[in-house]
């Protein structure tokens, strides 16, 4: 007795093929969901400083809390500040911008780069102390105005600026700083 085998797949083979296809589709969907969740988790750990670090050397526009844009080449990025080399039409001097004074940024990429050196964790104090030590002429900008002078003292959370116009010294809390720029 010879058996006749059907020419197409049997009902059982079709059922198992369908189950395998469903399992593959579910595995792909689970993998996609896992990738999305891991991506969201990674984004949740990014800091603004990390985003800036990823584009050192690029041209960015930083919008300060007073709404003024500051365009320049990003020279350095630390946990609390960035250093820009101004481009025309902005003054072509260097600008130290506390990250707390940033309202928005144009020119950042989607990626981030974690801190790689101890300098990245330096706060505003050490950078301002180096400007004080160099007796550099600076323009200190806050929401209430701009003062040209030399940094006389740097405390834990503030600086004193000896004004160039001879009107004394102005104390500026770090929380009020928008930008400290090189003055001509």
Image: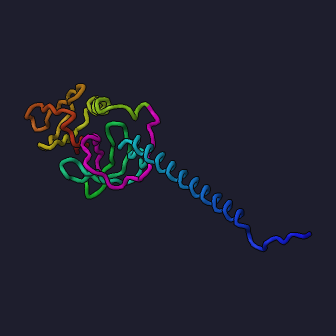
Total numbered labels placed on residues in the image: 0
Q: Is residue 21 above or below residue 35?
A: below
| Res 95 → quadrant | top left
Quarter of the figure that contains the N terminus: bottom right
Residue 121: give x, y in percent of width and height: 38, 32
Left or right of 26 on screen, residue 115: left
| Res 28 → quadrant | bottom right
Residue 99: give x, y in percent of width and height: 29, 41
Quarter of the figure that contains the C terminus: top left
The magenta stretch spans residue 75 = no
Give me the residue at 55% from left, 51% from top.
31
Residue 46: give x, y in percent of width and height: 40, 42
Left or right of 4 on screen, residue 35: left
The magenta stretch spans residue 105 = yes
Give me the residue at 14% from left, 37% from top.
164
Q: Nearer the viewer, residue 111 or 168?
A: 111
Q: Which residues are magenta?
A: 91-117
| Res 13 → quadrant | bottom right
Residue 126: give x, y in percent of width and height: 32, 29
């Amino acid at each position: 007795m010879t058996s006749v085998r059907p020419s197409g797949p049997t009902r059982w083979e079709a059922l198992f093929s369908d189950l395998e296809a469903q399992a593959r589709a579910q595995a792909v969907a689970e993998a996609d969901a896992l990738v999305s969740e891991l991506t969201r988790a990674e984004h949740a750990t990014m800091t603004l400083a990390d985003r800036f670090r990823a584009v050192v050397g690029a041209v960015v526009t930083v919008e300060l809390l007073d709404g003024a844009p500051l365009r320049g080449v990003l020279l350095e990025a630390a946990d609390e500040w960035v250093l820009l080399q101004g481009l025309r039409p902005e003054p072509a001097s260097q600008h130290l911008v506390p990250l707390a004074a940033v309202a928005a940024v144009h020119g950042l990429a989607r990626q981030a780069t974690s801190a790689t050196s101890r300098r990245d964790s330096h706060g505003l104090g050490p950078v301002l102390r180096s400007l004080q030590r160099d007796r550099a002429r600076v323009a200190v900008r806050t929401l209430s105005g701009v003062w040209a002078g030399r940094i006389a003292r740097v405390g834990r959370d503030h600086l004193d600026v000896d004004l160039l116009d001879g009107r004394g010294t102005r104390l500026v809390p770090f929380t009020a700083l928008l930008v400290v720029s090189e003055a001509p």
